Amino acid sequence: GSGAIGLRTALELLRRDVPVCLRSAHPPTHPSTCSTGAGGLWMPFKCDDPRVHGKWATETLDELLHLVTNSKETSADSTVEIVPTLYLTKSPHYTTEDKIGGVPLSKNSENERYGEILNSENVNPLPKWTQDPRLSFQQLTMEMLSSQNEVLKLRIPSKVELVDAGYMYGWLFYPPIVDAPRMLMSMLSEIQLHPLSEGVNIDMSRKYNSIEEMVKDAKDLGCNTVVNCTGMGASLLCGDDSMVGGRGVLLHYDRNCERLRDQDREKEMLHDTAILIEDGLWGTSSEPCYIIPRGNKVVVGGSYLEGDTLQGIRDSERERLVKNAMRFGVDTEKSSIVGEWTGFRPCRPGVRLEIDKTFGISEGVKVVHSYGHGGSGWTTFVGTAKETVDLLGYTKK
């Protein structure tokens, strides 16, 4: 595979001095590669596997933050950048500390009301990943957010717009966002230039119809292992009926597109912000509303429609996405859509990361599966790659 999972797994093997042959039906930036169209935001999404929210996400965050720290490029030119991110909700969530009163709140009416709500029974827990201090995570009321934004100047809807739409709370945090196409090509380039890749055929037009065909090809190439990172392709290759495509749709605008001024403020908001909504008036679980600054584009979404196999974007969806762009400050009358994309997140009840006990045994070829990461491929690609190679018994350098 040539998506985020496949390329990073190949890199992990090479970094542990294990030669690889890379096979894929398409190059990394082909439209059918789910990773290339993804928003690239580090945040566990549409994948309930607990490993996604734990070690895999943490190890990926480690590497992405390291890349940001050591990058000499400006944000607009970088493969990874830190972007303020706002996740809007109608209701608050709590941490264990909140529930037992371990987090002191300052004595003002807003915080006292916030504390009372947190201690009610009808409140959901915050995800574990929000506790990582490197994300500078805060859960804010709209009053708190509005006050902070007098200084932060984030490109977000006004307090009036948000409250009128029913959004009373927001998670403000600072995750890395990957410029997906650039990162894919960067990983492929590292594979091609690695000393162990010299003379190895990297074939980006090789299609397989079965795992048996993969095993035969591996044996002919002198390989002792097949690592299956084929995403949605695994549904057919493995006969995995638990796999379902979570269809997503996006519009692309130029990162420097015309922006609407906040009519409730005299000063223009300056800083690009990723905004995500999955409930309330603007978004739902199956039709999330979001904008993500990514490289030289802003991507506007979205959808999560399991079993919907339509390749293009419906007119009604395009109309909704344009409306989302306008809500988040894009002047859609003066800004042209520069691209659109439809992809299918590889979803299943849990990620399949295991050694196959059926295929390849008689041929002396081990088969390892790594697929089904849902909407969390860019959140787990490093951690998943490391665990896959650990599973094969190759020690870390």
Image (cartoon, rainbow, N blue to C red):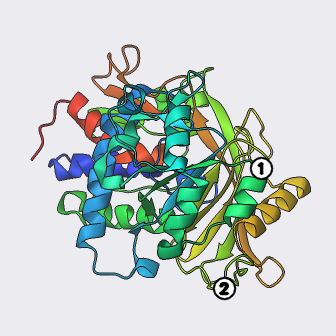
Residue 143 quadrant: bottom right
Kindly identify which numbered label has been placed on residue 266. 2
Q: CA distance from mark 1 to mark 2?
A: 43 Å
Determine contact: label 1, label 2, CB under 8 Å. no
Seen from the viewer's position, the closer of residues 60 and 264 is 264
Q: Earlier in the sequence, mark 1 or mark 2?
A: 2
The answer to whether residue 27 is visible is no
Kindly identify which numbered label has been placed on residue 374. none
Residue identified by numbered label 1: 311
Q: Count residues near mark 2 (Cα–Cα under 10 Å), then give few for <14, some for 14-19, many for 20+.
A: few
Q: Which residue does the image show at 50% across and 57% down from the upper left? A: 40
Q: Marks 1 and 2: which is nearer the front?
A: 2
Classify 364 as above or below 334. Answer: above
Percent across and percent down for residue 293 are 56, 68
- Outermost residue, right side: 315
Q: Is residue 136 left or right of residue 321?
A: left
Q: Is residue 372 left or right of residue 37?
A: left
Percent across and percent down for residue 127 are 45, 35
